[in-house]
Amino acid sequence: MHIQGGRGAAEALNWLRQINKALGILTAKQRYHTKSGAVGSPQKRTLGFTLGTAVGRSRAGAGVDGIENERRAIVDVTLGPWKAESVDDKPLAEAMGDQAWKTVEKADGFTPKKDPHGKLAKSGFTISGRLTSVVKMGGTTHVFSTFTIWVDGTMSNVPPVEGNGFAEGSNTAEDALRAITEARITKILGVIKTGRVVKAG
């Protein structure tokens, strides 16, 4: 991956570390449990599944590397398209897009915009997603997805972000996918706030 701006090797490495930290890329798995409630309200529903790599934590009111977020101009973020490798999983892809919209809508400093007829926006930031696989093994459903950041309709300097996890018990693949989507979109917005997301050079 080429990083624009003529930075030296040390600075480029530091930038990559900041991306990884902002996206919360971890090797360990984290189990999330919250009070049961309506689907679509991650803070209230039970999430009896484990997210795979890339679920981090941040302090309320803090940005990347613990720097307090400042009031900034509202940034429009186009969402979509949302696709699934299997036609049977199309409803899950739609749920993925719905959760992404809700996540950006409640995020400070961002406004969600719909993709233009299922295509990438020609200007500004776009976040798209793909549900790559849903695999059932016994009482467990594994969900694999990928999120991509685009700038002016082209790939950004941030590599695609994987969103993998599984649901078990009474939880569904949609429950898992919605929680994964919320976590990944939140982290991606944090990276965009750094001001360093540009077209891949």
Image: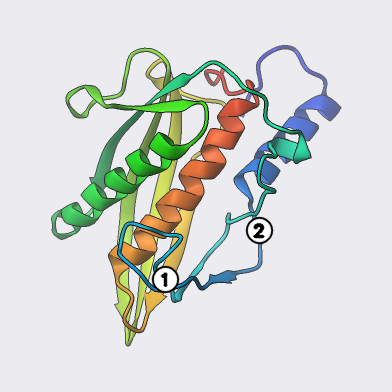
Residue in the picture at 33% in, 46% down: 130
User: Do residues under tags 2 and 1 come within 8 Å of each other at their CB atoms?
Assistant: no
Instruction: State the image quarter where residue 155 is shown.
Output: top left
Question: In this figure, which residue is indicated by the disc labeled 1?
Answer: 166
Which image quadrant is residue 39 in? bottom left
Q: Residue at x 30, y 77 (%)?
A: 136
Q: Secondary structure beneath disc 2?
A: loop
Checking the image for residue 177, the label placed there is: none
Mark 2 residue crowding within 10 angstroms, few (<14) / some (14–19) / many (20+):
some
Q: Where is residue 178 drawn, in percent x and y?
A: 36, 56
Residue 53 location (% of width, % of height): 57, 59
- Amino acid marked by disc 2: Leu
Amino acid type, callout 1: Phe
Q: Give the residue at mark 2.
A: 26
- Counting from the top left corner in percent of width and height, residue 82 is at 27, 41
> Is residue 179 positioned above or below 188 on the image?
below
Instruction: Locate residue 134 relative to residue 111 in the image: left or right.
Output: left
